[in-house]
């Protein structure tokens, strides 16, 4: 997980606008959840991951391809942060017919990352 973009509002917009590929978006969320890849042993170190996540996902999940981890990510967003994309970035959402599960999951990930950024 090298060469991750910095966590800032430009990166959040790049996620929403699909300027960053799915793999990097997953890697960003994994990184801020605490997952680290050990190149020497070629295994995931989850010692920095919250116990609740570590129990359900000992290895980082693919949030874009799988609904259950995205649901868990959504539920982990504090109520006061649920509308951060709208409140902080003015994101109006996607238009009907122009989005599917992939875009919705990317928006969830962007919102979670923005919440993480706001709490730093």
Image (cartoon, grey):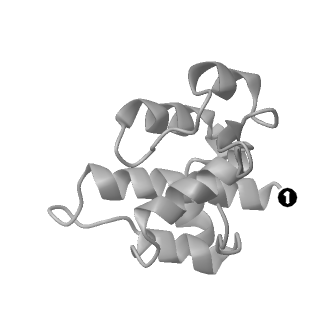
What residue is drawn where x is 70% and y is 69%?
Answer: 7
Q: Nearer the viewer, residue 59 or 81?
A: 59
Q: Position of residue 81 (x, y in %)?
A: 64, 49
| Res 62 visible | yes
Residue 107's place in the image compared with 48, above or below, is: below
What is the quadrant of the N terminus in the image? Answer: bottom right
What residue is drawn where x is 75% and y is 44%?
Answer: 34
* SS for dot 1: loop
Which residue is situated farthest in the front direction here? Answer: 40
What is the quadrant of the C terminus in the image? Answer: bottom right
Q: Position of residue 87 (x, y in %)?
A: 59, 65
What residue is drawn where x is 28% and y is 49%?
Answer: 101
Which residue is situated farthest in the right direction here? Answer: 120
How many numbered tags mark residues here? 1
The answer to which image quadrant residue 57 occupies is top right
Find disc 1 in the rendering and name its residue: 120
Which residue is situated farthest in the top direction here? Answer: 55
Left/right placement of residue 25 relative to residue 58 reads: left
Left/right placement of residue 53 relative to residue 94 reads: right
The answer to which image quadrant residue 2 occupies is bottom right
The answer to which image quadrant residue 52 occupies is top right
Q: Position of residue 82 (x, y in %)?
A: 57, 47
Q: Nearer the viewer, residue 2 or 64?
A: 2
| Res 90 visible | no
Residue 50's place in the image compared with 105, above or below, is: above
């Amino acid at each position: 997980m090298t060469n991750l973009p910095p966590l800032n509002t430009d990166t959040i917009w790049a996620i929403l606008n699909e300027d960053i590929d799915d793999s990097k978006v997953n890697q960003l969320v994994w990184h801020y959840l605490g997952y680290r890849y050990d190149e020497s042993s070629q295994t995931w170190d989850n010692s920095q991951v919250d116990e609740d996540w570590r129990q359900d996902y000992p290895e980082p999940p693919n949030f874009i391809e799988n609904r259950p981890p995205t649901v868990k990510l959504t539920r982990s967003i504090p109520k006061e942060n649920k509308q951060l994309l709208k409140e902080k970035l003015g994101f109006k959402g996607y238009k009907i017919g122009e989005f599917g599960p992939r875009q919705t999951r990317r928006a969830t990930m962007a919102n979670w990352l923005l919440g993480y950024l706001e709490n730093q």
